[in-house]
Amino acid sequence: MSLTLPISAATERGVAPDLTVVLPTFNERGNLEPLVAKLDTALAGIAWEAIFVDDNSPDGTADALRAIGRQDPRIRCIRRVGRRGLAGACIEGMLAAQAPLVAVMDADLQHDETLLPRMVEAMGAGADVVVATRYAPGGAAQEGFSAFRSFGSQLATRIARRVLGVTSSDPMSGFFMLRRELAEKLAPKLATDGFKILLDILSTAGEGLRVTELTYNFGTRQSGDSKLDNRVLMDFLGLIVSKATGGLVSLRFLSFACVGAAGLVVHLLVLKAALSSDLRFLYAQTIATFVAMTFNYIVNNVLTYRDRRLSGWRFLAGLLAFYLICGLGAAANVGIADWMFYETAHWWVAGIAGAVVGAVWNYAISRAVVWKD
Ligand code: GDD
Ligand code: MN
């Protein structure tokens, strides 16, 4: 039995690509055709393929891509279901790349595709990573950027450079190129839930990385909406903390802990209100505890676990499990604090230790039981 392809199929096979362009998409249907046309023009003379990574966009982006791919087999789409997240999408796209060089860029026409050939050249000249930057000397005009966003983005860049030692002028850029090999090596260590993928790559690869920067204009979005605006800051801070603590504290844990701190404020406010309406302390404290736990649950469901948000009966089942977990967490908290108090005789050491143990317990168990993968 021979596995040789029929002649016609073999001759119709395309050339192996030298460059894979990875394009994460969420509701970008209207941008696909112009984008593919632009890539085709910009990359004339380079053997390329494009891998779109779509998180099952409700606007039918994946179907539209299949239609384009039937005309042009260089265009493929990885369609993910049940998952959201820009970083994870980029990582999966890079790992699926066929070419030795991989570029990542947005699919909303805000990134200037005519830069790609120069990025390929810079890779040829020995760069490990080429970053398309908005801030390099010679400064790009900020067409697609509000003053507020521009300020926030530059502030974030400074923090990243200070805390992580990343030297790029635009580590927040979503437009960059690297060798597939490097992406494969780093992939297991990269966070899938943030979207500061380049910052993660640069800080994970560490020193000795040859980074070349090319300046471009960040264009204006023509169709669809930006999905990132409101979450930029939190995700960014989370990544910084995770990197700065050597992975000890994760994006999710930080978010969980912040929600917990907010929950404490809610608890105290409810307690105060309940006490002022002459309720017995025991009842007031019970009510405040349930309100705070419910608050924590809802906010964590919306923020911390937005990528696996529970709804319907799962939401209710999750809430009951969460009450149980927090109850046990409180017991652990009190037990540890009591023991520490005897050991150290410092009330605050004992208090903090109890709270940390309780928080870590609540986080670990609710993650394993309530918001499991
Ligand atoms: N697969 C997938 N999943 N794609 C996503 C998701 C997601 O959850 N969220 C956003 N995308 C896609 C969008 O469809 C778009 O192609 C690209 O990722 C960027 O998303 P935007 O929502 O347009 O982000 P932005 O313009 O605010 O910010 C982008 O550009 C900045 C400048 O380069 C991001 O790339 C930032 O990281 C970057 O700093
Ligand atoms: Mn955009």
Image: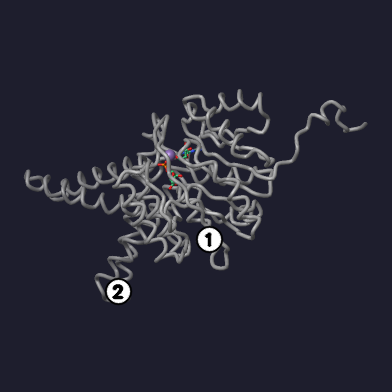
Q: Is mark 1 within 8 Å of ligand 1?
A: no
Count of picture labels: 2
- Image coordinates for residue 240, horizontal then vertical, percent: 41, 59
Q: Is residue 335 above or below residue 131?
A: below
Amino acid residing under circle 1: Thr
The residue to which callout 2 is attached is 342
Give the farthest residue toward the right: 1
Residue pictured at 58% horizontal, 54% vertical: 188
Residue sitting at the far front: 138
Instruction: Residue 77 in the image: state x and y as whole percent.
Output: 60, 33
State the mark number for residue 251: none
Marks 2 and 1, how far apart at CA: 42 Å
Q: Is residue 311 above or below residue 213?
A: above
Question: In this image, 219 relative to 214: left or right?
Answer: left
Q: Residue at x 55, y 60 (%)?
A: 211
Element marked by disc 2: helix
Question: In terms of depth relative to the viewer, which is nearer, 90 or 188?
Answer: 90
For disc 2, does the CB lie below 8 Å from ligand 1?
no
Q: Give the residue type at disc 2.
A: Tyr
Circle 1 packing at 10 Å, graded few (<14), some (14-19), many (20+), is some
